[in-house]
Amino acid sequence: MVIEQEKMQRLATRMVEEEVKGRSPWADARKRFLRNKAAMAGLVILILVALFALFGDMLAVWSNEELDFSVMGQVATMGAPSLENGHYFGTDDLGRDLFSRTVQGTQISLMVGIVGAGIAVIVGTLYGATAGYVGGRTDQFMMRAVDILMSVPYMFVLILLLVMFGRSIAMLFLGIGLISWLEMSRIVRGQTLSLKNREFIEAARATGVSTWKIIIRHIVPNLLGVVAVYATLLVPLMILTESFISFLGLGVQEPLTSWGALISEGAGTMNYGTLWQLAFPLFFFVITLFGFFFVGDGLRDALDPKDR
Amino acid sequence: MTRPLLDVRDLRVTFHIRREGDLPWTQPRELHAVGGVDFSLAPGETLGVVGESGCGKSTLARALIGLVPAEGQAEWIDGKDLIGLSPRQMMKYRNDIQMVFQDPLASLNPRMTVGQIIAEPLTTHHPGLKRAEVKERVKAMMEKVGLLPNQINRYPHEFSGGQCQRIGIARALIVEPKLIICDEPVSALDVSIQAQVINLLIRLQRELGLALIFIAHDLSVVKHISDRVMVLYLGRVMEIASSDDLYAAPQHPYTQALLSAVPVPDPAHDMAASVVPLAGDLPSPLAPPSGCVFRTRCPRATERCAAEVPVLSGAGHQTACHFPGPLTEAEIAFARRTEAA
Ligand SMILES: Nc1ncnc2c1ncn2[C@@H]1O[C@H](COP(=O)(O)OP(=O)(O)OP(=O)(O)O)[C@@H](O)[C@H]1O
Ligand SMILES: [Mg+2]
């Protein structure tokens, strides 16, 4: 029997020395996500929309505020989409370039969605995890506060706020941020309650890890799956809320615009033969919503394989 | 006699149970999960704790470590009573008392690497340590419990149950505690792995001079590892004695019934003939029997057992029974008849 002593020795030391990289639960989820075709399609769409929002301005010939006097007054005939005069998506009723208006609307709408969901993730997660983990009276008090806030008809309050303090984008963010985290905090609390009695939390408590560290180090990372899924589904909801308000004419103010405002304008002039004014913003609106829903669905399947 | 590491006197844990739909002013029902337990533990000694499911073994462990509020006294070697310490005062002792849990995988955070898990007690109690040093000590500890140190970046789900329990043991040992409480550390493991883990615990205990409280639900597991064994029933101590005494000459009828069910590795031994059955079910801990809590299932119970609570008595070999002693043939036959009925 000839086992090369030296080689074996080297193998043995290498086995001990080289640190093996672990396969984290996140890596597993990523692999499942990458294999999900619908989710990947959604992701590609979202990336394209984001690129459009970020770099669309560079392609635009016209700025979003300029009026093109050559088409003014005859938008229905001269303002149609064309490559020659640089109005790729045509112009709106006033002769402004719809392409750069759509780029800007996309920026605003995406921002509203992402900021709203971001607030929900940060505030909702910490609030819900604290309430659930601390429990007792603190929990009762914190969750009753959420109940009360949720029982307020928020659309009504938001509209009131916008009417009272004037329409500004800051007000819009504030209003949407105020409501977005409520549902999230409830979901997170429920999850925390079921995590709280797991043995690894008990192990951490037994060695004296502080409450705050347990929440941050043990509870929150185990919640992130649910939070990520809910957040991706929350973005389109925020976009819808903003669009609805803008559609009512209470959202962002000219010269700023958003999908909702553009769709509203487009719908208003539908009967004059300028369908492109509705079609382009609507197209972006719809594919983005679909994109987010597909990605959210894919995330859920990837993070919770048992669910299928 | 040397000072005991831990001296527990009349330790009680009472849970207040509220039923669904109770009005706010109704008195909650009291559940005495641990009802006055006494024992002492010398440094480096192993105490086995045995009892049926629900008899308060885990609750006892959790009370000692300050995870549930308890009454009574648990004096540490430095003279401090651990019961009722504020969280800040308790912090010092959390380093000296560590715990190993029943479910190996569930006691490890699935989102943390093995290195992070084992290091957590260390970084909690010695926040000043350098990263490299922590890693060094974690690796040394992994080696000690029989894990490959190069697996430090792996996640719990990549390990088997036995390996996960080794991770749990490494986490408990890393801060060099004086006492480790093992709450059924092998119940969730295969029999062959059980022996490995128990042998590991025995080896580490000898090397490091640890005291162990080893909880199990049957007597066969603790026999190997314990210096002394305590038998619990409905949160009360039935019998406590040195391991040799307890297995050779059990005095309490409950201990004898438990022991008769332990498999004997002797082909000539007839299990069916030797088992003393326990009549009836475990009474609800919400409404324990009066007097001796075991009397409802005891073949020797008399009126006195219903009236008077037996105290734990005896020197060395202590028994809480009015009529201790080996069961007679007649009593065993009586137990069989009531079981069959
Ligand atoms: N947090 C709690 N609130 C109310 N009752 C509890 C609580 N924890 C335990 N109990 C009750 O206390 C009793 C003892 O439970 P414990 O978990 O200590 O038993 P155990 O001996 O560890 O059982 P097992 O072998 O199943 O682990 C049980 O009747 C249980 O229902
Ligand atoms: Mg238990």
Image (spheres, coloured by chain):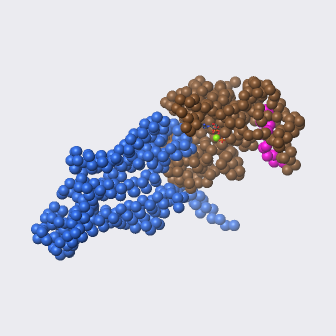
Question: Which chain is the one coloured blue?
Answer: A
**Residue span colored magenta:** B250-266
Q: Is residue B44 magenta?
A: no
Where does residue B291 sit, x and y in percent of width and height?
74, 27
Regarding residue A266, the answer to whether it shows in the image is yes
Observer able to see residue B46: no
In the displayed orientation, state which residue is furthest to the front. Answer: A271
Residue found at x 67% / y 67%: A2
Residue B142, relative to residue A30: is it above or below? above
B318 up-or-down from B117: above or below: above
Residue at 77% from the left image edge and 32% from the top image edge: B295
Identified at 39% across, 54% down, the residue is A231
**Outermost residue, left direction?**
A69
The residue shown at (67%, 25%) is B2
Quadrant in the picture for residue A69:
bottom left
State the count of labels: 0
Question: Please, which residue is most extreme toward the right here?
Answer: B329
Write down the quadrant of residue A278 in the picture. Answer: bottom left
Quarter the N terminus of chain A occupies: bottom right
Along the horizontal axis of the image, is A104 left or right of B223? left
Chain corresponding to brown in the figure: B
Q: Does A105 sit above or below residue B109?
A: below
Of B322 and B124, the residue lying toward us: B322
Residue placed farthest to the bottom in the image? A84
> A122 or B171: which is nearer to us?
A122
Measured as percent of width and height from the top left, residue A38 is found at 43, 67
Q: Quadrant of ligand 2?
A: top right
